[in-house]
Image: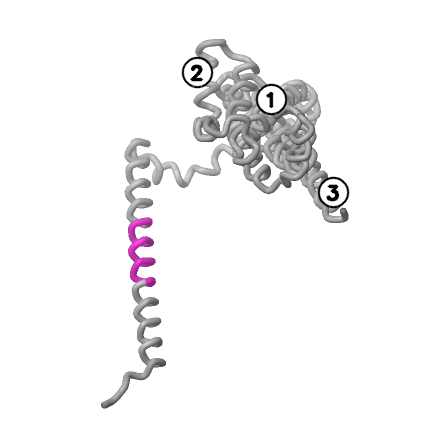
Amino acid sequence: MTHADPTFDTRAHYMALMARKRLYGGLVLAVFVALMASGFMLADERNAGGFWRGLPHVFDFPADVIADTAPKLDQLPGHLVTYFPALVETVNIAAVSTLIGAVLAMALSLLSTRGLARWPRLIPLFRRSMDIMRAVPEIVIALVLIFILGGGPVPAMIAIAFHTAGALGKLFSEVNENADLKPVEGLQSVGATWFQRMWLGVVPQVSPNYFSYALLRFEINIRASAILGFVGAGGIGYELKNAMSWGQGKFDEAAAIFILLFATIVVFDQLSSHIRNAMIAKKGSH
């Protein structure tokens, strides 16, 4: 009577498992390609089939901007000065909305973290609230608020703060889960209120991570506030829309706005990266 070779059985089982894995991977890839192709065809049809016809002209607008700006380079510094206040307004919208959103996110994250929540039974409610705030795009909220409140920076600020609260709340709650509960328990033993336990026992531990995420969100909000300007929410995006709407002859002003936006995003990106790296290095030295 012969016995089966265990090594051969293991090898055969492994080869069958790998073949099945490759089959599943191929099926998933095929479904993904089919979805991408059908989605692209649908989008092209909704665009009146203009994608392929417009593809050769994709660089026409940059070429027009350069052609319109080159003879007027001497006017570029004046345009930069003219649109700088609008840039300051955009940065202010991003800063205020980030601050308000971060404060709200901090409260929501503490109320939705197991072991820290003031009302444990309401944790799912607070988590679903953050999901909704995070899921609704800023531009949708801004359009609704502009319809109600009229154009200006206030609708943009509220819309970005609302979305920021949901996005940062999720990140903050994950940070809270790694907090040491011993200081919280010590404060509770001496009769501290829930707010005192959170403010003195949790926030000092997680504040570097809070600040790091808030800085990252601030960069995102600068871009968002510029985009919302296109729908009438004020700031430099509104000025860019006007400059582009005038068409040929005003593209030098659009170029100045592009330069201001690009320089601002680069400066704040480098600044926030430097601050985050310094915080990480300081935290690692302790």
Q: Earlier in the sequence, mark 3 or mark 1?
A: 1
Q: Earlier in the sequence, mark 2 or mark 1?
A: 1
**Farthest residue, direction top:** 149
Instruction: Please name whichever residue, 75 or 132, is drawn nearer the observer in this view of the structure.
Output: 132
Q: Indicate whether 178 appears above or below 201.
A: below
Locate residue 146 relative to residue 267 in the image: left or right. Answer: left
Secondary structure state at the residue bearing disc 1: helix
Instruction: Please name whichever residue, 77 or 263, is drawn nearer the observer in this view of the structure.
Output: 263
Which class describes the residues within 10 Å of circle 3: few (<14), some (14-19), or many (20+)? few
Q: Which marked residue is nearer to the observer: mark 2 or mark 1?
A: 1
Q: Amino acid at mark 2?
A: Val
- Residue carrying label 3: 278
Give the CA separation, mark 2 to mark 1: 20 Å
Q: Which mark is residue 144?
A: 2
Confirm or deny contact between disc 3 and disc 1 (CB under 8 A).
no
Q: Quadrant of residue 272?
A: top right
Residue at the spot x=51%, y=12% of the render? 151
Q: Quadrant of residue 283?
A: top right
Residue at the spot x=54%, y=18% of the render? 158
Magenta range is 21-32
Colouring scheme applied when the structure was drawn: one colour
**Farthest residue, direction left:** 1
Give the CA separation, mark 3 to mark 1: 25 Å
Residue at the spot x=33%, y=80% of the render? 8
Confirm or deny contact between disc 3 and disc 2 (CB under 8 A).
no
Question: Residue 199's x, y, as percent?
Answer: 67, 28
Locate residue 283 relative to residue 139 in the image: left or right. Answer: right
Q: Amino acid at mark 1?
A: Ile
